[in-house]
Image: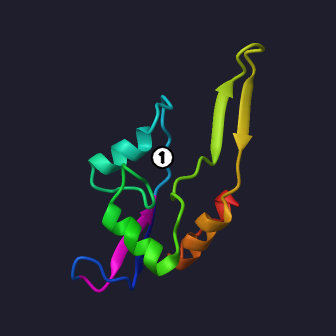
Amino acid sequence: MQNAEVELEFNNKPTSRYCLVEAIPETGRMHQLRKHFKHIFHPILGSRPHGCNKQNKLWLENYDLKGMMLHAHQLIFNHPIKNEQLILNAKINEEFSRIGTILNLDLNKYK
């Protein structure tokens, strides 16, 4: 996990804190990560309706964030017919990279 703090006023505090988390879901259920992170009061930036609308608005107005800061870096599953393990890797998109730069996060692993 990587932590970040930016000079972005929120709830009468001069800065806002965020973190980059690597999560490995086991079931792949719909909205699993979004719901779980909201439940523990750590919503994913840009997530609607499972996020924080005030944070989403803050990031839209200050940094033009329109997408969700959730990225499936790697998917591993068995082929449904051949039963061979398939591993798919994906690079982060430009917006995720841009927000990572704003937060001074090391995203090299995901590029």
Residue 106 appears at what percent x and percent y? 59, 69
- The residue that label 1 is drawn on is 23
Q: Residue at x 38, y 74 (%)?
A: 58
- Secondary structure at badge 1 equals loop
Q: Is 19 in the magenta?
A: yes
Does 61 appear above or below 82? below
Does 8 appear above or below 68? below
The magenta span reads: 13-20
Q: Left or right: 85 with respect to 7?
A: right
Residue 5 appears at what percent x and percent y? 40, 78
Secondary structure, magenta segment, majority class: strand
Does 13 appear above or below 70? below
Does 17 appear above or below 47? below
| Viewer-closest of 104 and 61 | 61
| Viewer-closest of 63 and 25 | 63
How many numbered dots are placed on residues in this image? 1
Q: Residue at x 33, y 60 (%)?
A: 52
Q: Amino acid at mark 1?
A: Ala
Residue 22 appears at what percent x and percent y? 50, 52
Residue 82 appears at what percent x and percent y? 78, 14
Q: Residue at x 52, y 53 (%)?
A: 70
Q: Left or right: 26 with respect to 78?
A: left
Image quarter for residue 100?
Answer: bottom right
Q: Left or right: 90 with respect to 39?
A: right
